[in-house]
Amino acid sequence: MKSSLGKRIKALRKKLFRKTEDNFFRPRNRFITVGRHTYGIRKNTIIGATEKSPVSIGHFCSIGGNVQILAHVGHPVDLPSTYPFRSLVFRHTKNQTPAPGHLNHDSVTRGPIHIGHDVWVGHNALILSGVTIGIGAVIGAGAVVTRDIPPYAIAVGSPARVIRHRFDPAAISALLKSEWWELPDAALEKIDSCLYARDIPAFLDAVVRQRANPGGQ
């Protein structure tokens, strides 16, 4: 019994996800893109990604447990009812075509969701449609993200609000300009001591050296 259930779960996982060369699982949905080494994406993490509300997540992101990213699953609030009659009761599609990749005829969205590189999303956070979370941002556990979060900001609460930035404006500008996340893994490994040091200028200098001399130390 357990063996049969295990096979069914494995088959379902294979259908919904693909395994990448870096041993991470990625959703099989053309409206979802996930960068390299990003981890924590599970079966129910991203809900309702469509052509009108694609979801993109950058490299090196850390997605906590029970995080949900709600793309094209909103209910209209400017109609007499918020109930999805055409999807659940009337069962017809007259003059109503759902977005590609979507079967819900009633849901609405505020647009794409973009999560930048090196973003940490805490446990139980909720990310709504139409928002951009900037590179290097931190989303606190249980936060509800309803609007854009700037790069390297720390946001908490419901709705999420920025409580501070991780670094000063000059350091943030330099980090963004460096685009260190585009370095290959081998180059990053050579500067791993800088990745684990609280010295942004030294880290940026190491990134510049790696770009100038990829084969050097």
Image (spheres, rainbow, N blue to C red):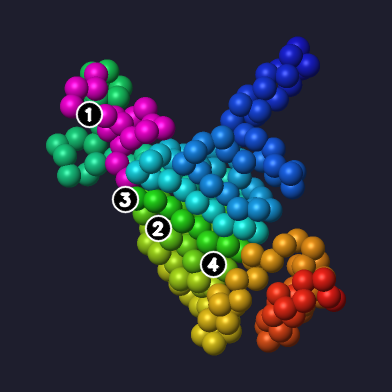
Q: Position of residue 173 (x, y in %)?
A: 53, 81
Residue under the point 64% across and 65% down: 182
Dots 3, 2 in contact, CB < 8 A: yes
* Residue 96, label in figure: 1
Q: Is residue 30 left or right of residue 131?
A: right
Q: Is residue 30 above or below residue 103?
A: below
Q: Position of residue 158 (x, y in %)?
A: 42, 60
Judge by depth and name the residue closer to the eye, 155 or 215.
Answer: 215
Seen at 16% across and 39% down, the residue is 79
Q: Which residue is mark 2?
A: 131
Separation of disc 4 and disc 3 at Cα? Answer: 21 Å
Name the side, left or right, on which 112 lies relative to 142.
Answer: left
Give the residue displayed 48% in from the left and 75% down from the top: 163
State yes or no: residue 129 in magenta.
no
Check disc 4 and give the amino acid type: Ile
Name which of mark 3 and mark 2 comes first in the sequence.
Answer: 3
User: Residue at label 3?
Assistant: 110
Check the image and report above or below for 213 versus 135. Answer: below
Q: Main secondary structure of the magenta part?
A: loop
Residue where numbered disc 4 is placed: 135
